[in-house]
Amino acid sequence: MMGEMKGRFAVTVGLKGGTELIKTAKSWAQTLALPYLERPRGVSLETLRIERNLAGLLVATRKGPQVETEEGILFYHPSMATLRVRALKEGKTDHLVEALALRPGSRILDGTLGLASDAAVISYAVGPEGTVVGVEASPILYQMTRLGLRSYDEGDEDLVKALRRIEPVLGDTAAYLETLPPDSFDAVYFDPMFEHPVEGSSNMVPMRPAADHRPLTRSVIEKALKAAPLVVIKERSRYFLSELGAQEIQGGRYSRIKYGIIRRTP
């Protein structure tokens, strides 16, 4: 969110790429201002990435985009959003929904979009009359998520509709916030990358080398509080949330995940 992202990225094709996939990959590379790498026959994605000293590869395949990093291969999937939306439909509570005080029509900015799992829950909660914009700094995660939001069609129809309503933006969150008029949103949400992955979230491990690891700062929060009267930060550390100025901390009694609440003061 601040400064330069770590690592370098490039675009290539999967096995048996063919003319159309090569054309697609080159188009992605041009759109994202990333290099396109020819993939010699028999050369693995891992070898290509290591030889070019890359943090990750965006790969055009017949099944859609995938991201390859030193931790593995990642395909688009809304992850826990599937279960969380189901729970909301059953009348159960969701700590993020409560922390953001979501209601139909709410306007929410997700400053750390990632794979849009949290944004999907938010989008479902605010409904078709609401607005959910998500900013992602990593170009290869942005592209995979952008296309995934358009094409994912498995499971719950309401979840699929919620995914379609999310508006992804590629860029630096701090810079994006500076372009917004005051009170453009009702709340801004941040889910900074944890220093260590959460146990049980192994499906997200391949994303880590491609993600934005820059820390959230008070400067960015101040910008967010101009764009919205409420900022919510997801974290495991109460100390970290307090350091960022959280006035209140919410979350389940037995959950390691907490939500820091910061409200604009007059």
Image (cartoon, rainbow, N blue to C red):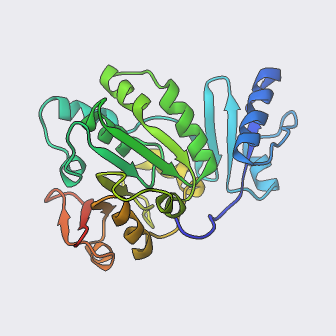
x, y percentage for residue 87?
19, 34
- Residue lying at 36% horizontally and 38% vertically, measured from the top left: 120
Closest to the observer, 190 or 41: 190
x, y percentage for residue 205?
50, 51
Instruction: Work out whether 2 lies above or below 36.
Output: below
Inspect this view and state whether residue 80 appears: no
x, y percentage for residue 81?
33, 37
Report the side of 161 relative to 143 (left or right): left
- Residue lying at 30% horizontally and 42% vertically, measured from the top left: 122
Closest to the observer, 260 or 64: 260
x, y percentage for residue 99?
21, 54
Indicate the quadrant where residue 231 lies.
bottom left
- Residue lying at 45% horizontally and 47% vertically, measured from the top left: 134
Instruction: Work out whether 106 lies above or below 228.
Output: above
Inspect this view and state whether residue 222 appears: yes
Indicate the quadrant where residue 21 lies.
top right
- Residue lying at 63% horizontally and 67% vertically, measured from the top left: 4
Instruction: Work out whether 69 lies above or below 167.
Output: below
Quadrant of the image containing the C terminus: bottom left
How many numbered dots are placed on residues in this image? 0
